[in-house]
Image: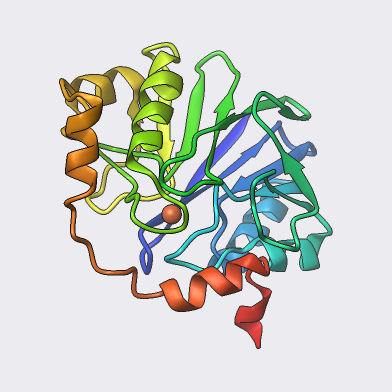
Amino acid sequence: MLFRQFFDSESSTYSYLLAGDSGHEALLIDPVIDKVDMYLKLVEELDVRLVRAIDTHTHADHITGLGKLREKTGCITVMGEQTEADCVSETIREGEHIRLDGIDLEALYTPGHTDESYSFLLHSERPAVFTGDVLLIRGSGRTDFQGGDAGQSYDSITKKLFTLPDSTLVYPAHDYNGWTRSSVAEEKAHNPRLAGKSRAEYIDIMNNLDLPDPKMMDVAVPANLGCGLAADV
Ligand SMILES: [Fe+2]
């Protein structure tokens, strides 16, 4: 299997390319519009074929690459069924699988950061979960806009993500400190918002973060509801 992690330094976003071996089908998770040419160059160099582009949720801090990738490659764009983004070609729901050559990705509905956030569990010899912004490395995504809910975030993390095997690797959609991956065991033990914290304590922490709006929020959310294409206008 081919696996690549990309970093967008403007928004501290991680995007992921997964593919079977050369000549096989590929997918991208949480692509950023400014990096589309780079993804496509690598896709060509690795001799794989991009067939799906997935957003874990409607991002507020960068413009999605979904629309541009679909325009350039004809790939199918995917988000969870609760999304309001109008140009998604395929929606997915809890427990459904995306299966490509050599790739099996299961959708887990994990609301909390937004009410349409999904995580994607890669079934493989070394399972991995792409958590979007619901679970970050030693943190978690804010819950104060876009239908966010701190209690739902706690439940998604503790009842769904933390019930995966401890060795499951954790790949978030962002990191602001330089961490590149974690594991379920590490986050259970060391995530300061969750380790040893009750649901009420977590809600209290999340409701008192007092964060400013993301600098691109006013641009990114409306653009991303149109799969990022409004950004070209
Ligand atoms: Fe987000």
Image label count:
0
Q: Position of residue 67 (x, y in %)?
A: 71, 66
Residue at x-position 77% and y-position 61% = 70
Q: Is residue 125 above or below residue 48?
A: above
Q: Quadrant of ligand 1?
A: bottom left
Q: Position of residue 144 (x, y in %)?
A: 33, 55
Question: Which is nearer the eye, 70 or 143?
Answer: 143
Farthest residue to the bottom: give it: 233
114 relative position to 198: left or right: right
The quadrant in which the N terminus is found is top right
Question: Which is nearer the eye, 39 or 60?
Answer: 60
Question: Which is nearer the eye, 154 or 50?
Answer: 154
Q: Is residue 162 above or below residue 221?
A: above
Q: Is residue 50 visible?
A: no
Residue 36: which quarter of the image? bottom right
Residue 93: which quarter of the image? top right
Q: Position of residue 115 (x, y in %)?
A: 51, 46
Q: Is residue 40 above or below residue 128?
A: below
Q: Position of residue 154 (x, y in %)?
A: 34, 31
Q: Is residue 232 above or below residue 164?
A: below
191 relative position to 99: left or right: left
The quadrant in which the C terminus is found is bottom right
Residue at x-position 54% and y-position 50% = 57
